[in-house]
Image (cartoon, coloured by chain):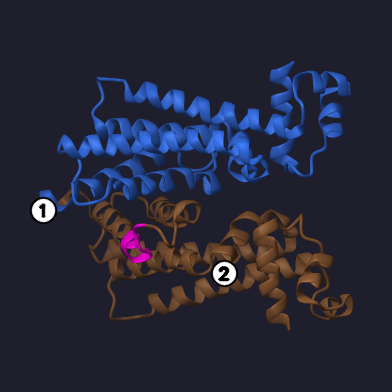
Chain colours: A brown, B blue
Amino acid sequence: MKDMIMETGIQLFGEKGFKETSIQDLMDELKVTKGTFYYYYKSKEELLKDIHLQYINRLVQHQESIINDESLNCEQKLYQIIYSLIHDIKKEGLTAKVFFREMRHLSDENLDVIVSKRDKFRLNIQSIVEEGIVADEFRSDLPADIVTFGILGIANWSYFWFQPDGEKTDEQVSKIFHEILVQGMNGPKNS
Amino acid sequence: MKDMIMETGIQLFGEKGFKETSIQDLMDELKVTKGTFYYYYKSKEELLKDIHLQYINRLVQHQESIINDESLNCEQKLYQIIYSLIHDIKKEGLTAKVFFREMRHLSDENLDVIVSKRDKFRLNIQSIVEEGIVADEFRSDLPADIVTFGILGIANWSYFWFQPDGEKTDEQVSKIFHEILVQGMNGPKNS
């Protein structure tokens, strides 16, 4: 049931917005009573927090399996992470929408939890960049923190434009972005 | 007066959110009567549209002055556009917030107007990329449309993290991103 409530939350918050969705709307859609809802969640915001948490936890978990894959070098890890972000928008579009758009409706306390997980996700990418610099895969004259924001920007922005049924697949888009970033981070040392 | 209403709209919509701000809130902040407000705007949404329109018009106008500057080559034009976006977040943070966050509260009709201006802004960047490919400034094996989304992503994402009073200036960040993008778009032809 908890999973079903979460699914319905994603659907309604994604389509109508968090503010615009009442607990009554959720109950109507789920065909359950108030008692059932409150058995699982203290409030609508608690449900929003769970949606955020599940989304970011899944991303971080997948990211760490990439990072720990010793068969990949840094630029290959970077590709896998870019692909996972763009693929996720394809697969989990509505959840991504709720994640990016409704964050400001979380309480400060819940926001802290989510932000620290987002930070972890970002700092994991930054470690790959730093590792790649040490391994001489990437140039050393660009600051790893700002480069990391660039990588996140290029991948996350896809949420605003990427059409899963469009001309280019998630894989093609990921390859193009990876190509630009890696070549850009390789720097002029080859010239 | 119209300017003052717009300023106050940006402030309240940016701080509290569009949905959460009433016309009464606007009047209280402005210390004007309902009559004054309705003399200038038919509705709160009309005001939101004006804020969006002013923001995107200013961006497009500045962009076109860059594009028409014949002293710049394509990669220099690209730098100026990236800088203008990141500088704008520094200068007009609250307006950018309203622009990115509150767009979904526009009516379909008003949204069409804004979206077509956003498209124009994007297609202007795409022309620079295409021109740069023809001029052999940029590699020709990457599709200009996806590359353009990458450029917009890297620059626009700054809105979510860039701290105007942080360690790096808007100029430094722009240079780093420009460096990655141009190097990436130069491609392996130098290697």
Seen as rendered, the residue at the extreme front is B109
Magenta stretch bounds:
A167-174
- Residue B81 seen from this side: yes
The front one of B75 and A33 is A33
Residue B135: mark in rendering: none
Disc 2: which residue: A56
Mark 1, secondary structure of its residue = loop
- Give the residue at x 72% y 35%: B45
Q: Is residue B125 left or right of residue A31?
A: left
Disc 1: which residue: B191
Question: Does residue A65 sit above or below B118 in this rendering?
Answer: below
Q: Position of residue A125 (x, y in %)?
A: 42, 64
Q: Quadrant of the N terminus of chain B?
A: top right
Q: Mark 1 packing: few (<14 Cα in 10 Å), some, or many (20+)?
A: few
Chain of the residue under label 1: B
- Residue B137 seen from this side: no
